[in-house]
Amino acid sequence: MTVGSTLVLALLSVPGPAQAAVRAQLGDHGDYSRLVLSVPKGVEPVAVVDGCVLRIGVPDPLRWPLASLRDSFSRRLSDFVTADGGRSLTATVPCGARVASFMERRNLIVDVGGPPVPGVKPGGTGDGAVEVQPEVVITAAPPPVVPVGVAGVVETLNPIGTANAAAMTLPLPPREREGAQAQLGKGEGECKNQGAPCADSPSPSPLRGSPPSPGTGEGISPPLPVVASLEGEVRDSIQQTLRQLERMPERSAKPVPQAAEPPKPPAPPPIGAMDLAGWAGDDFNRTREALQAALDTAQGRARIEAQIALVRFLLARAMDEEGRAALETAASLSPAPDQRYALRILGDAFRALDREDAPDDNLFVQQPAGTMPDHHVWRSVALAPTRWATAKEGLPVALRRLLDYPADLRSRLLTTLAAAADGAGDSAALNLIVLEMITVDSKGMADGRLDYFRGRLAELKATPDAALERYDAAATLRRGPFARRAEVRAIELRRGLGRLDEDGAIAALEALRFAWRGDDIETDALAALGGAYARSGRTDAALDIFGLLGRRFGATARGRDALAAGRTLLVAVLDRLEQSPPGGLYALALQARHGRLVTLVDGPDGGPDGRLRLQLATLLLRDGYGLEATRILHALTEGATGPRRAELGATLARALIDGGREGEALDVLTRTGNSELDPALAERRALLRADALLGDGDTVRALDALRGLSGAEAARLRAEGLFAAGEWRAARNAFAELAATGAEPTADDLALQGLSAYLAGDAEGLRGFGEAQRARLAGTRWAGLLDALAPPPADGPLRAEAVERDLAAAGALDRLARAWRGKP
């Protein structure tokens, strides 16, 4: 028993067959990149180039050094991926590259050069006239050393020598000759038999040129005599060259040869036709079982093809969630480049099916449609939710092609096109789409969507009775989102026609809201109910509904629907707040509780001016909440450009000046101004600048800023500036002339005029002013001013106590006037 147990343990401890490892080296040379793979003994790898992919296949699975290959940089080899369970290694190479491969013992050597340059022969210098040097093998035997004279060297390098000067081939020094042999790789250029050509040794890479063989006699000058005096030979040759240069006329420099332009990367192949009817199959269960069986039995590339077939089946059946999961599975199987391109096309189709709001990187949008009808279909569907004007260009071709699509997919695509045409108010396009819906009459149209869009078309044609008939027909189904959406539209249409009062509409919408939960119709019902609350004065309930809509925002199509519904409700709430008396808390509650939601709602749909946020800021300023209003105006101003930025800057500066923050107002006016402004806006900004300078205590600069400005506001600011500067007589005259500009003087203007007359010592003017303006100041905060400024009686001596009391009263009134300026 002991012996038997020992044998069993020994057998179990023997390791199973393990995959052999491959060593790799990767590097770049001047005009080519080299990949060297050391494979196990007996393995014969095969390198094949397929388009832009290099594939190296072996019969048995191997362990490829992906980590070291991916960490090595190469200009021509990248994206190393293993496939077929370790039986192949793929890499991306430049499209059209020249690739050469050969085996050296157990090393597979692959050289990848750049694509051929048009008009240049391979191995040439770029001008297209140089012949390719003959390819020879460099042997280990050194070539015979030829004695060379200095006169021959000078004659060869002479720029004005004879045209038939012979080319010279100089022997390489020993170290350079050994380095040239080593560059060919281990084993290249070595022969066992020095006297015979190397038959078993591999030739150098065909991507590189080789120097001519010393034994061929091509391009070798005849031997030259040895010169006795090297120094004298060089000196004589240089002097002779200089004399020839002096006698020759000046010539223009040779033009620099233009390098050939690098070839442009090839354009992606066009999107082919789609056999969606064939992909869907006649029987759902049978087709799906066949695809799953093929997927279970396939291996390597065939397995990825089977997965792509499953994705196509799910697209044809309009099963978007299952299709996205199948796409992720296919991407994890390391597909080839052509398979990745097919998967990207299918992925873009699923994105269009889900009504994505950013179609610019979609292949159907990026590439021209041409004459392919399927391309027109998916291009129109991808562009329809956001750019209907561009999407409708291919609508006739798309509608004809949709007649051959499977029923489920056709219903989804027609619904997307109809919703986009309805949102854009394009009755002609919606009429074409509805006619096709009636023509196909598929089972996907039996949930009320056909009657709903026919009702929307009737509304666009201004036939409300026909629209109500269609909405009622869809609402009788009591199932499906379009039946409930038709019910909401019918309630809103009856209320607009006066056939349903506000309380009845609220009751119907509340019943619909609580009876139908869980899909996108809930957002429409909530928006309609919130609008009814706002119109009936129940602002608290409307704000609660607005917050509930905000919790349903997301990156999906339903989130965008909720965003549009929330904007409709926000418009209704703001319109109601504008009609309410000032001083309430609803505007402040809206900003404090739902400020971020207001920004989201007013983002893309509100346009660059942010109309809804500007309306909310105006309400906050009216109700006295300047801090929250200035925050909104700051955000709007920083996001605007051009004249709109200057206009918003002026609005923000007015709010800051009214809040006593004149320094910030000056900074805002400086940052938001430019020289290309409308004259009216430029004058408004100049008045704001003068007002801010005056409030900041800089009276001289404020009066300078008012030069050249006319009108009631400029005259008022000029009078206030003179009053602040202590020019009492000039201020009194300026306030008195304010009525001449056509403006009605305010109580503050009259009070400052009386104070100016008092401080200027104009008793007669003050007495006449009091008799004329006493009734105007009655009931204002300046009602007791005239009694305080009344002169003492004329009889009796003037007492020092009375003078001191009058001066103290004047100083107190001056301070009071400064503190009250600009406040209600």
Image (spheres, helix red, strand yellow):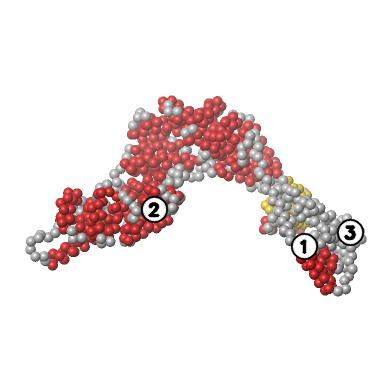
Q: Is residue 466 visible?
A: yes
Q: Would you call the spot at circle 3 few (<14 residues within 10 Å), some (14-19), or many (20 or more)?
A: few
Q: CA distance from mark 3 to mark 1?
A: 35 Å
User: Which residue does the numbered mark 1 point to in the structure image?
Assistant: 248
Relative depth, front residue between 306 and 529: 529
The mark found on residue 108 in the picture is none
Q: Would you call the spot at circle 1 few (<14 residues within 10 Å), some (14-19), or many (20 or more)?
A: few
Query: What amino acid does circle 1 point to?
Result: Met
Q: Left of 165 or right of it: where is 406?
A: left
Number of marks: 3
Q: Left of 820 or right of it: where is 619?
A: right
Q: Element under label 1?
A: loop
User: Which residue does the numbered mark 3 point to in the structure image?
Assistant: 217
Query: What amino acid does circle 3 point to?
Result: Gly
User: Which residue does the numbered mark 2 point to in the structure image?
Assistant: 631
Q: Residue at x 47, y 44 (%)?
A: 604
Of the two numbered discs 2 and 1 on the same chain, state the one appearing first in sequence: 1
Q: Residue at x 56, y 44 (%)?
A: 360
